[in-house]
Image (tube, rainbow, N blue to C red):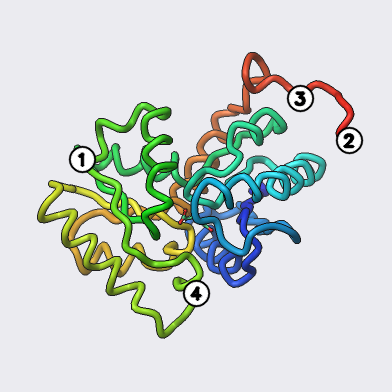
């Protein structure tokens, strides 16, 4: 099966990191098609960037549908444009945030999220509420790391993320950690080993989840909110 993995920001190095993480998680026979829009914000940090990224994301989803991909993954932790993408697509669409929350809730009673900046926290908290998983999340923490700092080798991003994981274990009662940025996808294994608890990367969780949906023959319902968009002029 072909799975389209869309990084909604326009930073190619992050798209390649996401591709590698998706390919590590993919089952034999799954081909990962990792893309990002040609136009849009270089990183998504908060509501404004999130909105700017949606048109480019939807254009990539539309291309994937035309190419007949088996499923789509939205590789931004805010699950940018998720509902609009599900209205557009027939194939299943999973966001890395929602996937990671579910994976963590299946291996721990309470999890904490460690994301990038404080401005990214409200969107994540809102998603936890609308997905019905807010009661399973002890806290959404920000490591005070700009998204693109995760692409810089010399940044102190890893130390800052480490510190927040330690605090989540000590102060929040976290039994698992969800990495709150696609740009952290390469850190899950070493952080799991270092901190001795499950550290979930949403890219891997989303790939595994959509593979399951495809194997079960489940596609996006086209009734109600995810009914196909009505034809209309776009001036
Ligand atoms: C992400 N931003 O996964 C989110 C994380 C965040 O450009 N890719 C981004 O900080 O909201």
Inter-mark Cα distance, 2 to 4? 37 Å
For the C terminus, the image quarter is top right
- Label 1 belongs to which residue? 110
Which callout, 1 or 3, points to the residue nearer the camera?
A: 3
Give above or below for 228 relative to 101. above
* Mark 2 C-beta to ligand 1 under 8 Å: no
Q: Nearer the viewer, mark 2 or mark 3?
A: 2
Left or right for 229, reference 70: right
Decide: marks 2, 4 in contact (CB < 8 A)? no
Q: Residue furthest left?
A: 170
- Element type where label 2 sits in the image: loop
When asked about the image quadrant of residue 65, the answer is top right
Query: What residue is drawn where x is 52% and y is 48%?
Result: 207
Compare marks 4 and 1 and give the one earlier in the sequence: 1
* Position of residue 58 measured from the top left corner of the image (x, y, whole percent): 71, 43
Q: Earlier in the sequence, mark 1 or mark 2?
A: 1
Q: Which residue is mark 3?
A: 229
Q: How many residues crowd mark 4 within 10 Å: few (<14), some (14–19), many (20+)?
A: some
Which mark is nearer the camera, 2 or 4? 2
SS label for mark 4: helix
State the separation of the CA atoms marked 1 and 3: 37 Å
Residue 151 numbered tag:
4
Mark with earlier residue (1, 3): 1
Residue linked to disc 2: 235
Structural distance between the alpha carbons of marks 1 and 2: 47 Å
């Amino acid at each position: 099966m072909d799975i389209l993995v869309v990084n909604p920001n326009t930073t190619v190095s992050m798209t390649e990191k996401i591709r590698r993480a998706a390919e590590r998680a993919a089952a034999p026979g799954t081909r990962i098609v990792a893309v990002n829009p040609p136009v849009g914000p270089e990183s998504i940090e908060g509501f404004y960037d999130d909105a700017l990224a949606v048109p480019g994301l939807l254009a990539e989803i539309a291309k994937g549908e035309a190419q007949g991909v088996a499923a789509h993954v939205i590789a931004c932790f805010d699950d940018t444009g998720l509902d609009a993408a599900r209205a557009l697509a027939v194939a299943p669409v999973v966001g890395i945030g929602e996937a990671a929350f579910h994976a963590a809730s299946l291996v721990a009673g309470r999890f904490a999220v460690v994301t990038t900046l404080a401005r990214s926290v409200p969107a994540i908290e809102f998603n936890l509420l609308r997905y019905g998983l807010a009661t399973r999340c002890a806290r959404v923490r920000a490591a005070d790391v700009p998204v693109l700092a995760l692409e810089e080798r010399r940044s102190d991003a890893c130390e800052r993320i480490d510190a927040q994981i330690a605090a989540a274990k000590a102060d929040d009662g976290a039994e698992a950690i969800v990495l709150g940025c696609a740009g952290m996808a390469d850190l899950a294994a070493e952080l799991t080993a270092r901190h001795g608890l499950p550290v979930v990367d949403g890219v891997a969780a989303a790939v595994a989840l959509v593979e399951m949906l495809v194997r079960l023959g489940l596609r996006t319902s086209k009734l109600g909110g995810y009914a196909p968009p009505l034809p209309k002029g776009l001036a």
